Protein backbone atom coordinates (compact mmCIF):
# COMPACT_ATOMS: atom_id res chain seq x y z
CA UNK A 1 0.00 0.00 0.00
CA UNK A 2 1.83 3.03 -1.27
CA UNK A 3 1.20 6.46 0.20
CA UNK A 4 -1.07 8.95 -1.49
CA UNK A 5 -0.90 12.72 -1.64
CA UNK A 6 -2.57 14.64 1.21
CA UNK A 7 -6.40 14.55 1.04
CA UNK A 8 -6.66 18.24 0.09
CA UNK A 9 -4.65 17.61 -3.08
CA UNK A 10 -6.27 14.30 -4.06
CA UNK A 11 -8.71 15.96 -6.45
CA UNK A 12 -5.75 17.14 -8.51
CA UNK A 13 -4.49 13.57 -8.77
CA UNK A 14 -7.69 11.74 -9.71
CA UNK A 15 -5.76 9.29 -11.90
CA UNK A 16 -3.57 8.22 -8.96
CA UNK A 17 -6.63 7.89 -6.74
CA UNK A 18 -8.50 5.79 -9.32
CA UNK A 19 -5.49 3.51 -9.73
CA UNK A 20 -5.27 3.07 -5.96
CA UNK A 21 -9.01 2.31 -5.71
CA UNK A 22 -8.64 -0.37 -8.41
CA UNK A 23 -5.66 -1.91 -6.57
CA UNK A 24 -7.64 -2.07 -3.32
CA UNK A 25 -10.64 -3.60 -5.12
CA UNK A 26 -8.45 -6.33 -6.61
CA UNK A 27 -6.88 -7.02 -3.21
CA UNK A 28 -10.26 -7.12 -1.42
CA UNK A 29 -11.78 -9.39 -4.05
CA UNK A 30 -8.92 -11.88 -3.65
CA UNK A 31 -8.60 -11.63 0.14
CA UNK A 32 -12.22 -11.97 1.26
CA UNK A 33 -14.56 -14.85 0.59
CA UNK A 34 -18.21 -13.95 0.12
CA UNK A 35 -21.44 -15.94 0.45
CA UNK A 36 -22.46 -15.44 -3.15
CA UNK A 37 -21.23 -13.73 -6.28
CA UNK A 38 -24.28 -11.45 -6.15
CA UNK A 39 -25.10 -9.13 -3.25
CA UNK A 40 -28.64 -10.35 -2.61
CA UNK A 41 -28.82 -8.89 0.90
CA UNK A 42 -28.26 -5.37 -0.43
CA UNK A 43 -31.34 -3.24 -1.08
CA UNK A 44 -29.67 -1.67 -4.15
CA UNK A 45 -26.25 -2.09 -5.74
CA UNK A 46 -23.88 -4.70 -7.05
CA UNK A 47 -20.77 -6.53 -5.89
CA UNK A 48 -18.46 -4.16 -7.79
CA UNK A 49 -20.26 -1.14 -6.30
CA UNK A 50 -19.70 -2.34 -2.73
CA UNK A 51 -16.13 -3.43 -3.44
CA UNK A 52 -15.49 0.10 -4.72
CA UNK A 53 -17.13 1.68 -1.68
CA UNK A 54 -14.94 -0.34 0.69
CA UNK A 55 -11.86 0.53 -1.40
CA UNK A 56 -12.76 4.24 -1.21
CA UNK A 57 -12.98 4.02 2.59
CA UNK A 58 -9.46 2.56 2.61
CA UNK A 59 -7.94 4.98 0.08
CA UNK A 60 -9.52 7.98 1.82
CA UNK A 61 -7.95 6.91 5.12
CA UNK A 62 -11.26 6.50 6.98
CA UNK A 63 -10.51 2.81 7.38
CA UNK A 64 -7.10 1.15 7.61
CA UNK A 65 -6.85 -2.34 6.17
CA UNK A 66 -4.16 -4.95 6.54
CA UNK A 67 -3.65 -8.59 5.80
CA UNK A 68 -1.91 -10.73 8.40
CA UNK A 69 -0.38 -13.99 7.21
CA UNK A 70 0.46 -16.65 9.79
CA UNK A 71 4.20 -17.26 10.02
CA UNK A 72 5.16 -20.83 9.00
CA UNK A 73 6.64 -21.41 12.46
CA UNK A 74 3.36 -20.45 14.16
CA UNK A 75 0.98 -23.35 14.71
CA UNK A 76 -2.09 -21.10 15.10
CA UNK A 77 -3.08 -17.47 15.58
CA UNK A 78 -4.99 -18.51 18.69
CA UNK A 79 -3.63 -19.81 21.99
CA UNK A 80 -4.98 -23.23 22.81
CA UNK A 81 -5.31 -23.57 26.55
CA UNK A 82 -8.15 -23.50 28.98
CA UNK A 83 -8.01 -20.77 31.61
CA UNK A 84 -9.00 -21.88 35.09
CA UNK A 85 -12.53 -20.76 35.67
CA UNK A 86 -13.37 -20.55 31.96
CA UNK A 87 -16.83 -21.99 31.70
CA UNK A 88 -17.30 -24.01 28.57
CA UNK A 89 -19.88 -22.00 26.68
CA UNK A 90 -22.85 -23.64 25.04
CA UNK A 91 -22.03 -25.34 21.77
CA UNK A 92 -22.15 -23.25 18.62
CA UNK A 93 -24.68 -24.61 16.15
CA UNK A 94 -24.41 -22.42 13.06
CA UNK A 95 -21.96 -22.84 10.18
CA UNK A 96 -19.71 -25.66 9.06
CA UNK A 97 -17.53 -27.71 11.41
CA UNK A 98 -14.52 -25.48 10.58
CA UNK A 99 -16.59 -22.35 11.26
CA UNK A 100 -17.81 -23.60 14.67
CA UNK A 101 -14.41 -24.92 15.74
CA UNK A 102 -12.68 -21.69 14.70
CA UNK A 103 -15.21 -19.58 16.58
CA UNK A 104 -14.66 -21.71 19.70
CA UNK A 105 -10.83 -21.41 19.41
CA UNK A 106 -11.02 -17.62 18.99
CA UNK A 107 -13.50 -17.32 21.85
CA UNK A 108 -11.25 -19.39 24.13
CA UNK A 109 -8.17 -17.35 23.08
CA UNK A 110 -9.73 -14.06 24.17
CA UNK A 111 -11.31 -15.48 27.32
CA UNK A 112 -7.84 -16.72 28.37
CA UNK A 113 -6.54 -13.18 27.85
CA UNK A 114 -9.22 -11.72 30.14
CA UNK A 115 -11.60 -10.27 27.53
CA UNK A 116 -15.37 -10.45 27.55
CA UNK A 117 -16.61 -12.36 24.49
CA UNK A 118 -20.12 -12.10 23.14
CA UNK A 119 -21.45 -14.44 20.48
CA UNK A 120 -23.27 -12.95 17.52
CA UNK A 121 -23.33 -9.30 18.61
CA UNK A 122 -25.49 -6.92 16.60
CA UNK A 123 -23.72 -4.68 14.12
CA UNK A 124 -25.18 -1.70 12.32
CA UNK A 125 -26.04 -4.22 9.59
CA UNK A 126 -26.38 -7.85 10.58
CA UNK A 127 -24.34 -9.64 13.21
CA UNK A 128 -20.70 -10.53 13.71
CA UNK A 129 -19.75 -14.04 14.79
CA UNK A 130 -17.96 -12.76 17.90
CA UNK A 131 -17.58 -9.48 19.75
CA UNK A 132 -14.52 -9.08 21.96
CA UNK A 133 -14.50 -6.36 24.61
CA UNK A 134 -12.25 -4.97 27.33
CA UNK A 135 -12.56 -1.63 29.09
CA UNK A 136 -10.14 0.92 27.66
CA UNK A 137 -9.58 -1.01 24.41
CA UNK A 138 -11.20 -0.85 20.99
CA UNK A 139 -14.06 -3.24 20.41
CA UNK A 140 -13.09 -6.16 18.20
CA UNK A 141 -15.79 -7.60 15.95
CA UNK A 142 -14.95 -10.88 14.26
CA UNK A 143 -16.38 -12.59 11.17
CA UNK A 144 -15.30 -16.19 10.63
CA UNK A 145 -15.33 -17.47 7.06
CA UNK A 146 -17.48 -15.67 4.51
CA UNK A 147 -19.27 -12.33 4.56
CA UNK A 148 -20.78 -10.01 1.96
CA UNK A 149 -19.25 -6.85 0.57
CA UNK A 150 -22.51 -4.98 1.27
CA UNK A 151 -22.39 -6.00 4.95
CA UNK A 152 -18.70 -5.14 5.14
CA UNK A 153 -19.17 -1.72 3.50
CA UNK A 154 -22.27 -0.82 5.54
CA UNK A 155 -20.57 -1.64 8.83
CA UNK A 156 -17.24 0.00 7.98
CA UNK A 157 -19.13 3.10 6.81
CA UNK A 158 -21.06 3.44 10.08
CA UNK A 159 -18.83 2.01 12.83
CA UNK A 160 -16.24 4.08 14.70
CA UNK A 161 -13.33 3.28 17.00
CA UNK A 162 -13.35 -0.47 16.50
CA UNK A 163 -11.54 -3.25 14.72
CA UNK A 164 -13.43 -5.45 12.28
CA UNK A 165 -11.55 -8.71 11.78
CA UNK A 166 -12.30 -11.23 9.07
CA UNK A 167 -10.90 -14.74 9.50
CA UNK A 168 -11.20 -16.30 6.03
CA UNK A 169 -9.07 -19.35 6.90
CA UNK A 170 -6.52 -20.67 9.40
CA UNK A 171 -3.57 -18.93 7.73
CA UNK A 172 -4.80 -15.39 7.10
CA UNK A 173 -6.58 -12.52 8.86
CA UNK A 174 -7.95 -9.34 7.29
CA UNK A 175 -8.08 -6.45 9.76
CA UNK A 176 -10.05 -3.24 9.26
CA UNK A 177 -9.49 -0.46 11.78
CA UNK A 178 -12.26 2.13 11.87
CA UNK A 179 -11.02 5.52 13.10
Image (cartoon, rainbow, N blue to C red):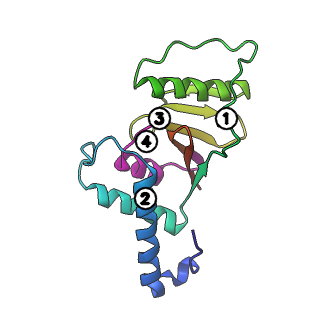
Which residue bears the numbered disc 4? 124
| Mark 4, secondary structure of its residue | loop
Calculate the distance from the C-alpha at mark 2 to the C-alpha at mark 4.
16 Å
Q: Quadrant of residue 28?
A: bottom left
Left or right for 167, reference 114: left
Instruction: For the residues labelled 2 and 4, say whether their Cβ atoms are less than 8 Å apart.
Output: no
Which quadrant does the C terminus fall into? bottom right
69 or 9, which lies in front?
A: 69
Q: Secondary structure at mark 3?
A: loop
The residue depicted at 42 percent of the width and 55 percent of the height is 30
Answer whether residue 160 is magenta in the image: yes
Give the Cα distance between marks 4 and 3. 10 Å
Closer to the eye: label 3 or 1: 1
Depth check: give the residue in front, 119 or 174.
174
Q: Earlier in the sequence, mark 4 or mark 1?
A: 1
Q: Which mark is residue 54?
A: 2
Going 65% across and 37% down the picture, which residue do you hit? 77
Instruction: Give the image location of residue 37, x and y in percent.
Output: 27, 48
Pointer 3: what residue? 128
Residue 105 sits above or below residue 13 on the image: above
Evaluate if marks 2 and 3 touch, with contact meaning CB atoms under 8 Å apart.
Answer: no
**Between marks 4 and 1 in the image, the one whose residue lies nearer the viewer:** 1
Q: Residue at x 46, y 28 (%)?
A: 99
Disc 1 marks which residue? 75
What is the distance, in whole Å, between disc 2 and disc 1 at their CAs? 31 Å
Amino acid sequence: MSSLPKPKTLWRHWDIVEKKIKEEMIWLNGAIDTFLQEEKSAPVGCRECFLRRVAILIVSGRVKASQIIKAPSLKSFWINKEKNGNKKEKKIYHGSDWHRETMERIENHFLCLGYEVLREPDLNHGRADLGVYKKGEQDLLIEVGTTSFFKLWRNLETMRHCIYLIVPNDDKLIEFTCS
